[in-house]
Amino acid sequence: MSLQAIKFDRQKTRLDILDQLLIPYQTKYIQVSNIDDGYSVIQKMQVRGAPAIAIVGSFSITCELNSVKDGQKNNHGYDVSDLSVFKAALEKRIDYLIKSRPTAVNLVNACTAIKAIVETACTIDDLYAEVLRYSVVLFEDDLKNNYRIGANGVRYIDNELSNFEGPFAVMTICNTGSLATSGHGTALGIIRSLWAKSKANPRNADDKTIQGQKSWLSHVYACETRPYNQGSRLTSYELNFEKIPFSLITDNMPAYLIDSLFSQRVNCPLPSRAPVKFIIVGADRIVTNGDLANKIGTFQLALIASQYDGVKFIGAAPTTTIDYTRDSGDDIVIEQRPANELTSILGGQVDSSDQFVTDSEGKVNLLRIKTATPNIDVWNPAFDVTPNRLIDSIVTEQDYLVKDSHGKFNL
Ligand SMILES: CSC[C@@H](O)[C@@H](O)C(=O)COP(=O)(O)O
């Protein structure tokens, strides 16, 4: 993946993030210099995806500390001559940052860890050094953990496919790849790892012998993911870049697609004959009983999977996404997003010959185009909760989990 969502220069304590509102039309990085900037890019979804939000949040705290630790004037009550006043000001700022987006727990978990560092630090220099160290480790560990999630997901899938031969397809929603994490991704990381293993196979569905693999990934279905279109803008960008065969579908197509593949219906042309065997999604928060909050639309995918014996539903996330303070999905706060995300779409401006209109610097002009009746009521929850009963496996960097004999995940 050539695009890196988060760039942090440790020597300069400088954070730049890729503006994901502009992808795939334009590649532009924005500097994040303090907690206000961090709040703003997270809230506007210029950076999004639970792990990426936590990393950017932590680095924004680091950058703010770097700019106030030597006593420069500031508006937030930091006083370098009084450690407890300094700490109280910082804690207030961290509490503000947490409110940027409420559903993903990774940011809360990172901020809680940083608050613990703040509490025990004996000097402002120590405090800064420890927060910097924590943020860098969070960033670096996320990448390592995503590769482990990929490997554990592949192990689960191999196990499930022990009696299946031939090509298979997977489906995913939202964007859980390099753009949502420090790299590789969670659900998309599993798909990448599966593809790395499968691509040695020719795309010839009849050849079951190559490389000794009985089954192989041959197609990915990416849900568009309205209203923010993470699927059509971001996931399809990543899949396209990696040359992983895929089809973009709208969020209301999965049931018909999966059923058509299973019943081998021929009255509707299909992109591939390979059956969807797995629906693989990320998570913004997984609570103690295994209920999983993720992008709106995830729940309906799990319901569809539950109707087909051969379709397994996988939630993939690092353990930083687990919230042990909440017992069930009913305790998760679901973020409501602005109405204009539903009543309009953001896209590249095209001229009559279907070329993107660019400004004098060659930058694409983005347009927000209204698509709904003006002044109507809108319901726009950004996430939903999939109950544990509909989840077949939760894959983390530690292992893949399946339910025990009582039907419970032991997280
Ligand atoms: C590895 S990202 C996991 C989740 O954060 C992802 O599936 C998701 O729902 C992102 O939602 P978003 O609103 O784009 O931040």
Image (spheres, helix red, strand yellow):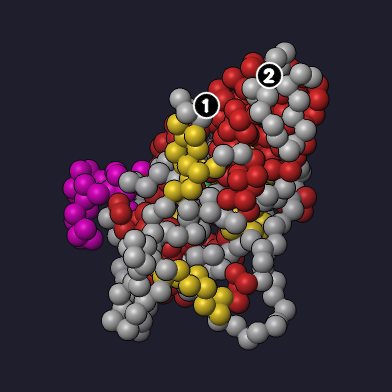
**Relative to the observer, which residue lies in front, 283 or 360?**
360
Q: Which residues are magenta?
A: 193-219
Q: Which amino acid is tagged 2?
A: Ile
Q: Of helix, strand and loop, which one carries label 1?
A: helix
Q: Residue furthest bottom?
A: 373
Residue 124's tag is 2
**Residue 375 to residue 135: above or below:** below
Q: Which residue is mark 1?
A: 137
Q: Position of residue 109 (x, y in %)?
A: 67, 36
Q: Is residue 407 left or right of residue 171?
A: right
Label 2 packing within 10 angstroms: few (<14), some (14-19), many (20+): many
Q: Which amino acid is tagged 1?
A: Val
Q: Is residue 205 magenta?
A: yes
Q: Residue furthest top?
A: 122
Q: Of helix, strand and loop, which one carries label 2?
A: helix
Q: Residue at x 34, y 72 (%)?
A: 356
Tell me the quarter of the image containing the C terminus.
top right
Q: Is residue 236 visible?
A: no
Q: Residue at x 27, y 55 (%)?
A: 243
Asked if ligand 1 lies within 8 A of label 1, the reply is no
Q: Residue at x 38, y 59 (%)?
A: 26
**Relative to the observer, which residue lies in front, 319 or 348?**
348
